[in-house]
Image (cartoon, helix red, strand yellow):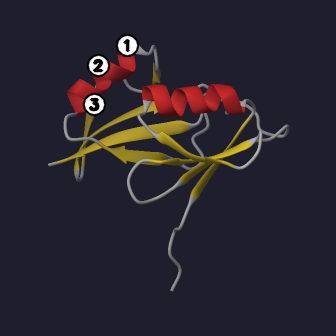
Amino acid sequence: MSQVCVISIYVPSIEKAIDFYTTVLGFEVNKQYGPKIVTLVHGDLPLVLEESKNAKTIPKDSFGVVLALKTEDIYQTVNMLKEHNVEFIADEPMDCPPGKVISFRDPFGNVLEYLQFI
């Protein structure tokens, strides 16, 4: 049986990525494996950021894999993201089967979502 054990995100700038994922999204640096790779934690599933010269900013019309984070108060989370001038895909949280969702982009164009389960 397969089980997801880690999620990796390749980025063009490790410093900018660490700043966004820690300052804006609340992840914590767990371990630095050198100047271009770091493990972040936010719950049970680790997130690896790795700088790669081949990593590019994602085009605006592309989604790829979407990382979803859980929130208890989606409107409070949206206000926090707005304080950090995050680029939203939709202006307001939308209804979805499990509750409410808001989609936004990291500084490199990767799509992320916050979900509030109802």
Q: Residue at x 48, y 47 (%)?
A: 67
Relative to 37, 74 lies left or right: left
Inspect this view and state whether residue 45 appears: yes
Query: Between 70 and 104, which is closer to the camera in this rendering?
Result: 70
* Mark 2 or 3, nearer chain start: 2
Q: Residue at x 45, y 13 (%)?
A: 85
User: What number of labels is visible?
Assistant: 3
Q: CA distance from mark 2 to mark 1?
A: 6 Å
Q: Which residue is denoted by mark 2 in the rendering?
A: 79
Q: Residue at x 62, y 31 (%)?
A: 17
For label 1, the SS is: helix
Relative to 4, 116 lies left or right: left
- Which label lies toward us, 3 or 1? 1
The location of residue 26, given as percent across then percent down, is 41, 34
The location of residue 107, given as percent across then percent down, is 60, 25
Are circles 2 and 1 on residues that touch, CB within 8 Å? yes
Give me the disc on residue 100: none
Q: Which residue is denoted by mark 3 in the rendering?
A: 93
Give me the disc on residue 83: 1
For label 2, the SS is: helix
* Identity of the residue furthest to the left in this view: 118
Q: Is residue 107 above or below residue 100?
A: above
The location of residue 91, given as percent across then percent down, is 35, 20
Instruction: Count neighbours of disc 3 (C-alpha within 10 A) and say few if under 14, some if 14 to 19, many if 20 or more.
Output: some
The location of residue 7, given as percent across then percent down, is 57, 56
Inspect this view and state whether residue 91 appears: no
Q: Amino acid at mark 3?
A: Pro
For label 3, the SS is: loop
Q: Residue at x 37, y 13 (%)?
A: 83
